Amino acid sequence: MIGTLKVGLIFAVFLIVYPTFTINAQSIVHDVIKTKNSERFDVDYNASNTFRRQPVVYQFSQSIPTNWQFTIQNNLSYLDSADAKSVIKIQEPAPSEKFIELAMFSENTGKFWAAINTNESGYIRVYERDQDGWSRDQPVFVAHANNQGLTITNGKRIIIDKLSVDDFVVGSVSIYGKDELTSPDNSNAGTISFDIIFGNPAESPLYFVPLITIIAIGLIILVLLIRKKRD
């Protein structure tokens, strides 16, 4: 009898708490725009103040296979702490454990890492820099394509180029910032904007726009460096 009452009490608490988490997630994610070959949304700063086991999750209505490009613009105002950060996971649909993880720390350090988790190899950080690891000058760019693998930029340059991950299907994006429930908040204002373009490149010329932008920026920097050396 007591066991039955405990189960009933736990279930009642779940019914009360779960909708609260759902409502909070829905209020944090906004300005969602969907088209045939793209989807964009903004996530408020509160997402970076959530616990790693209770992240804000944006679930795509349909899985996005193989050919896709993410641009991520971090416009958060971080609190004055070297540990203030946002962690973003681009995840495959369950039951797959494969995900791409990006961590962006406050301007105090500018620490940045990129990691891959797969069923075969486990969790591996493929790039990490403790100082000046990312920039707001340009969006962070994450892309995957047939026969091209995974490419990641940090807002400054390409840091991962054509890494083979044996295909990657996008199912959701999750955001958090706290490693422990008692950790201090990370951010107090701003948003993170996500924009994904997907599908057959031949069907969407816009698919190449982020890559063209990166190449153009690289050429401009190269020209400026050449001119500086001449001067």
Image (tube, rainbow, N blue to C red):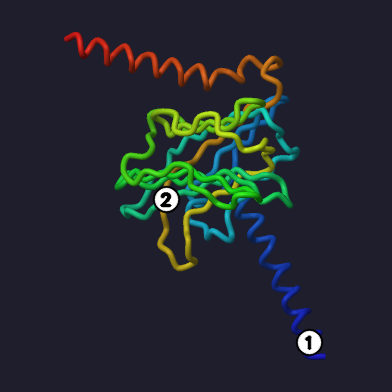
Check contact, mark 2 vs mark 1: CB within 8 A: no
Query: Horizontal and vertical percent for residue 7?
Result: 77, 80
Q: Is residue 22 left or right of residue 150?
A: right
* Front position in the image: 81 or 12: 81
Whether residue 195 is visible = no
Q: Residue at x 48, y 61 (%)?
A: 179
Instruction: Please give the name of the residue rendered at 63% of the width and 36% of the height, measured from the top-left corner.
Output: 32
Where residue 218 appears, x then y in whole percent?
Answer: 39, 18
Question: Which residue type does callout 1 highlight?
Answer: Gly
**Which disc is residue 85 wearing?**
2
Q: In front here: 27 or 68?
A: 68
Percent x, y of residue 210: 53, 22
Vertical order, 173 against 194 (above or below) = below
Q: Quadrant of the N terminus?
A: bottom right
Q: Which mark is residue 3?
A: 1
Tell me if residue 129 can be seen: yes
Tell how many labels: 2
Q: Residue furthest front?
A: 120
Q: Position of residue 8 (x, y in %)?
A: 78, 79
Q: How many residues crowd around disc 2 within 10 Å: few (fewer than 14), some, or many (20 or more)? A: many
Identity of the residue drawn at 48% across and 51% down = 48
In the depicted structure, whether residue 51 falls above or below residue 98: below
Answer with left or right where residue 45 lies relative to residue 21: left
Bin the neighbour count of mark 1 within 10 Å (Cα to Cα): few under 14, some 14-19, many 20 and up.
few
In this view, 86 is above or below 206: below
Question: Mark 2 or 1 closer to N-term?
Answer: 1
In the visual, does 211 lie left or right of 14? left
Which residue occupies 60% across, 55% down? 24
Left or right? Give the position of 225 relative to 13. left
Disc 2 marks a residue whose amino acid type is Lys
Q: Tell me the distance, in whole angstroms, between the alpha carbons under discs 2 and 1.
A: 42 Å
